[in-house]
Image (cartoon, rainbow, N blue to C red):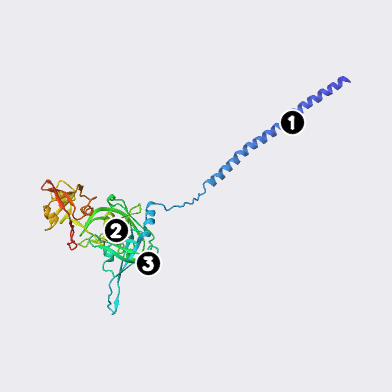
Amino acid sequence: MQKSNYGLISCLVILAVLLGVVGGGVMGGVAGYVTAQSAVSTPAVARATSAQQLVQTSAPVVTNITLKENSAIIEAVRKVKPAVVTVINQLPARRSFFGGTITPTSSGSGVIIDAKGYIVTNNHVIENGQNLQVIFADGAKADAKLIGADSIADIAVIKVDVPVPAVATLGDSNALQPGQVAIAIGSPLGDFRGTVTMGVVSALNRTLGSMQGLIQTDAAINNGNSGGPLINSLGQVIGINTLVVRATSSGNPTEGLGFAIPSNLVREIANQLITKGKVERPYIGILYQQVDPQIASALNLNVTYGVVVTQVEAGTPAARAGLQEGDVILEFNGQKIDEEHPLVGILFAHKAGDTVTLKVLREGKELQIKLTLGLRPTSELQSRATG
């Protein structure tokens, strides 16, 4: 009995071992299958996710950009524009072709230079005027009165007796360099108030007729811009626009030939007009021409600065001091006469009665000539450069 039980137990143990081996294999296979399926499905999901991200990242990106208008030029215009006015000049009445009378008007521009209401414009803008009126940048109007005018420099000062919206600052025209930004503001044709045009300082110390030391610019200047400011990128007035050349004497058309009166000269003339009502100019009593490389070559000069005396007027300080035709005045009281320091500007820093020393080149030799400045006659011919 014990022997047979032992055999039965042995059989059960063997059977259990076999079942364990078989079951383990089956379970291992199942586990392996599941693991394999997981390994296969994970890259697929990853690939799908990567594809989805690729689609998302390849979509166009929309970016909103806000530009702030804070450039120096825009700020300069904002600073000066409120101080620019339109000047309306009511001319004398005249008979109409159809009978009766008409009162013609002309217009130009101007710029407020003082909080007391002083405005600088051109003499030719207010010339022969019976009544003057200004229109401010915001459209408000005010009557104006003439303080003084100077036909030689084409500068006039008028005044309003109402609060002014802004005052412009006069800059240093001696610091100008060709190529720097120049901005003109004015009322072309009298209708387009506050028009802004921009160019560069094309050249300095230009002479046109009796006007000397002018700033040349290619900023567009049209009829009605006369008397308006030419400003730099700092918002400083560097000149007063005065004229434009549209064709040569032979009829050849030109473009971009505008001219402005330098601010340093404007400042001195305006101060005299405000304080005296007129301009008292010291003078030497000569006609002259600025020396440039062409003139220096033609006259066989060894200098390219100064002025050549083309005529000495009788009875003038120049005649009394012994200046002669053909003399080259190089310096005025130690100041070199050149493009940055024209004779007309140097003279304005002095007054009649001052005794000055001129450094003169005559037939290749340098001379020192003392001269006492006179008071320039108001009736003097102004068709050529005079000093």
Give the number of the mark in front: 2 or 3: 3
Tell me the quadrant of the picture where the N terminus can be found: top right
Question: Nearest the camera: 130 or 275?
Answer: 275
- Which numbered disc, 3 or 1, marks the residue that appears first in the sequence? 1
For residue 130, the mark is none
For residue 240, the mark is 2
Asked whether residue 20 appears in the rendered view, the answer is yes
For residue 23, the mark is 1
Task: Provide the secondary structure element on which disc 2 rests.
Answer: strand
Q: Position of residue 244 (x, y in %)?
A: 26, 60
Q: CA distance from mark 2 to mark 1?
A: 108 Å
Crowding at label 2, few (<14), some or many (≥20) Cα neighbours within 10 Å?
A: many
Identified at 30% across, 72% down, the residue is 104
Q: Amino acid at mark 1?
A: Gly
The quadrant in which residue 148 appears is bottom left
Q: Amino acid at mark 3?
A: Lys
Q: CA distance from mark 3 to mark 1?
A: 109 Å
Q: Position of residue 36 (x, y in %)?
A: 64, 35
Asked if marks 2 and 1 touch (Cβ < 8 Å), the reply is: no
The quadrant in which residue 253 appears is bottom left
Q: Is residue 43 left or right of residue 261?
A: right
The quadrant in which residue 33 appears is top right
Task: Provide the secondary structure element on which disc 3 rests.
Answer: strand
Identified at 60% across, 41% down, the residue is 45
Asked whether residue 242 appears in the rendered view, the answer is no
Q: Which residue is mark 3?
A: 141
Q: Position of residue 252 (x, y in %)?
A: 22, 61
In the picture as drawn, the residue positioned furthest to the right comes out as 1
In the picture as drawn, the residue positioned furthest to the top comes out as 3
